[in-house]
Amino acid sequence: MRALILSWEYPPLIEGGLARHVRKLAENLADHGVAVHVLARGLEESPAEEEVLPGLVVHRVREPRRPRDLAEFIAWVEHMNADMLAAGVELGDRFRFDIVHGHDWLVAVACDHLARRFRAPFVVTIHATEYGRHQGHVDRHPQSYIHGVERWMANRADRVITCSSYMREHVADIFGLDERRVTVLPNGIDPSELVPVADLETLRGQFARPDEKLVLLVGRLVYEKGFQIALEAMPRVIERVGGVRFVIAGSGTAEDDLRRQARELGLDRHGTFLGWIGDDLLHSLYRIADLCVVPSIYEPFGLVALEAMASGCPCLVADTGGLREVVPSEQVGLRFRSRDPNSLAEMAERLLTDAELRERLVAEASEHVLTFDWADVARQVAAVYRELAVGEAVPVEP
């Protein structure tokens, strides 16, 4: 079986977690009898040659760097899809593809055309929705445009994959899908890749004294990630616990507002905004923090929580979305009431002052993360491919 996977990002070009997801999936599918070709974006200055790797081949379409203005971004995406379609047609002249698999709306148009041209089933993984990111406010352009593409894509696809049961219900509801057409396959994690820098003691000394507690927040600095809720809770945590410092790692459209909020709350002396950071520093921060907080308002899955737990960092997450499935009980982490800074502060105080609780959570979480195995995810994706390729009926769930 041969699959063509389309993604707007693929390492070393990384915009977010999607690139890593597609890479790990593509690498592991080869072990389950799937020959994978990845069609992804490259930069204009990057070489356009095919990259042949064990079990897969990566093809690039060279594009200019993405514009920051969202209105311009829509036109840029349309141009990228036209280029991907042309490149995909050429690949179809060389190879017979049994499946076309797209990731999110950014490659939807090219995927649909190629699937029809190849007479192959179209699978789409929906990692997040515009409706969810904007709390249902998608009546204005360009949000309305993106929402429309997502609805069209979900209804055109022969199968939709989501990363959590929460997301299955979400996309079935907002796009009017029969849930039997939606398969839940969680993201995987490879703990061996969470490699920190060598000198963790020196690194921690840059952010906190030995007698202080260090709270870590990681992710895109956008409204739906809820960092504003964590900042609102921080003065109470500092007052109740004592020596507490925080680090915020990431960048995004809300960064200026969050920095302003921190100043107004008098938090300048208690924390650091690092901006965008590379993986080596991120993996190191997990190792030196006393607590990782994931305060999302909208969260399809919760990879940050999974990475923190795999790195031995206790986790406190919002009781919402896919985070309920990543942190399913108080055995592996704690949850606070979503959007409630007082609840966040209360649970953070509990974790930061109870060393025995932190140790227990870390021990249990180290076993829990092993259930999110990329080899198992790839096995299940390969099973979806085969089910569609041979035309079997979608099983009806009770």
Image (tube, helix red, strand yellow):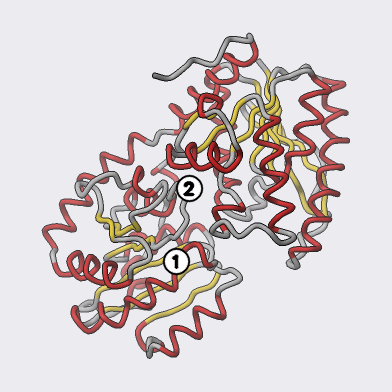
Residue drawn 55% across and 28% down? Answer: 178
Where is residue 315? Give x, y as percent: 30, 57
> In the rendered image, which quarter contains the C terminus?
top left
Residue drawn 45% across and 89% down? Answer: 263
Nearest the eye: 280 or 226: 226
Where is residue 143? Give x, y as percent: 69, 58
Q: Where does label 2 land, which residue?
A: 300
Q: Where does label 1 land, which residue?
A: 226
Nearest the eye: 58 or 4: 4
Q: In the figure, 290 relative to 150: above or below?
A: below
Q: Amino acid at mark 1?
A: Gly
Where is residue 368? Give x, y as percent: 28, 40
Q: Earlier in the sequence, mark 1 or mark 2?
A: 1
Q: In the figure, 85 relative to 128: above or below?
A: above
Residue drawn 28% across and 56% down? Answer: 335
Nearest the eye: 92 or 150: 150
